[in-house]
């Protein structure tokens, strides 16, 4: 009966839980789902990670290729993220070209990567004006249940943390390139951004880490990204205004949550590096 009521009257189902000061999954308003990360499980990629927040799961695979730099940035490589919200992850997504939500997710991940300054693109340069690395970062959501941007950033940062690239020798006189795949070097990760999403309902009711059902019924969502030192990104969707007190509460929660996520990623990455060495 409860599942039928949820299907027929989803808004009332959610409001009834909120009236009892709880959420449908039993969490308090300001509490998060369990987070887990698995690094380096895809052997075909140069680096990979699986990041889970509750039921939401995102797989990140990074593949490196050689290319010529842009004329305006001759000493910089490229990072090209691509988010795939597949029909496998949720019935809300359909086969075919990327939908609006998928495109927005890709652009938001790209902006977070740029604003956080996690990777210096000059570190991807092999020879100025001639040869640079392009990193294709595929982020595939295999189970969608809200807070997907948080999972994408977690998977991306975890994959970058163990990324290594082959040593490349470029001969400027002949243009010859020699790739030594057995001798690899790490790509410096200068910042570790962590994303936290909130949902806002009537009467400035705030919840953290919303599920898919909660996101659909929220009046607005807010995503805040912190690196180790400072806040580097704020993205708000929806037209409902927020009070200064509520925003300050979100910033404080996002900062502490970011510290926990970074610690989890660093622990997982150190385990992988120890097993390799």
Image: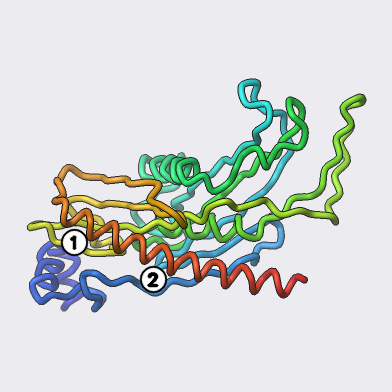
Among the two numbered marks 1 and 2 on one chain, the one whose residue lies closer to the N terminus = 2
The residue nearer to you, when weighing 153 against 54, is 153
- Badge 1 crowding class, 10 Å Cα cut-off, few under 14, some 14 to 19, many 20 or more, is many
The residue nearer to you, when weighing 38 against 96, is 38
Q: Is residue 234 left or right of residue 61?
A: left
Q: Is residue 143 left or right of residue 234?
A: right
Q: Residue at x 44, y 51 (%)?
A: 85
Q: Residue at x 30, y 63 (%)?
A: 253
Q: Position of residue 205 (x, y in %)?
A: 14, 61
Q: Residue furthest front?
A: 229
Q: Quadrant of residue 208?
A: bottom left
- Badge 2 crowding class, 10 Å Cα cut-off, few under 14, some 14 to 19, many 20 or more, is some
Q: Residue at x 47, y 54 (%)?
A: 193
Query: Which quarter of the image is occupied by the C terminus?
Result: bottom right
Q: Marks 1 and 2, Cα distance to the nearest angstrom? A: 19 Å
Please state the total of marks drawn on the protein image.
2
Q: Residue at x 16, y 63 (%)?
A: 10
User: Which label sits in the foreground, 1 or 2?
Assistant: 1
Q: Is residue 31 visible?
A: yes
Q: Looking at the image, is 26 positioned above or below residue 101? A: below
The residue nearer to you, when weighing 214 against 248, is 248
The residue nearer to you, when weighing 20 against 120, is 120
Q: Position of residue 91 (x, y in %)?
A: 36, 57
Q: Is residue 152 visible?
A: no
Which mark, by number, is residue 162? none
Q: Secondary structure at mark 2?
A: loop
Query: Which quarter of the image is occupied by the N terminus?
Result: bottom left
Residue under label 1: 206
Q: Looking at the image, is 144 positioned above or below residue 231? A: below
Residue under label 2: 54
Q: Looking at the image, is 84 positioned above or below residue 177? A: below
Q: Position of residue 50 (x, y in %)?
A: 54, 64
């Amino acid at each position: 009966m409860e599942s039928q009521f949820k299907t027929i009257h989803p808004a009332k189902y959610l409001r009834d839980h909120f009236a009892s000061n709880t959420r449908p999954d039993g969490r308090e308003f300001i509490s998060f789902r369990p987070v887990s990360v698995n690094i380096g499980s895809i052997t075909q990629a140069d680096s990979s990670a699986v990041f889970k927040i509750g039921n939401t799961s995102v797989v990140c695979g990074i593949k490196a290729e050689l290319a010529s730099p842009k004329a305006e940035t001759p000493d910089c490589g490229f990072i090209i993220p691509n988010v795939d919200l597949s029909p496998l992850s949720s019935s809300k997504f359909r086969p075919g070209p990327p939908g609006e939500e998928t495109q927005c997710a890709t652009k938001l991940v790209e902006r977070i990567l740029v604003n956080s300054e996690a990777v210096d693109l000059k570190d991807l340069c092999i020879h100025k004006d001639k040869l640079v690395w392009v990193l294709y970062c595929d982020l595939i959501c295999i189970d969608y249940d809200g807070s997907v941007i948080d999972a994408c950033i977690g998977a991306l940062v975890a994959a970058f943390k163990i990324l290594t690239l082959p040593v490349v020798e470029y001969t400027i006189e002949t243009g010859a390139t020699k790739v030594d795949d057995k001798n690899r070097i790490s790509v410096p990760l200068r910042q570790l951004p962590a994303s936290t999403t909130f949902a806002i309902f009537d009467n400035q009711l705030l919840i953290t880490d919303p599920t898919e059902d909660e996101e659909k019924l929220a009046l607005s969502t807010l995503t805040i990204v912190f690196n180790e030192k400072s806040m580097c990104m704020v993205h708000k969707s929806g037209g409902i205004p927020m009070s200064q007190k509520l925003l300050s509460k979100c910033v404080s929660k996002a900062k502490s949550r970011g510290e926990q996520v970074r610690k989890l990623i660093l622990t997982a990455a150190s385990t992988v590096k120890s097993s390799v060495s």
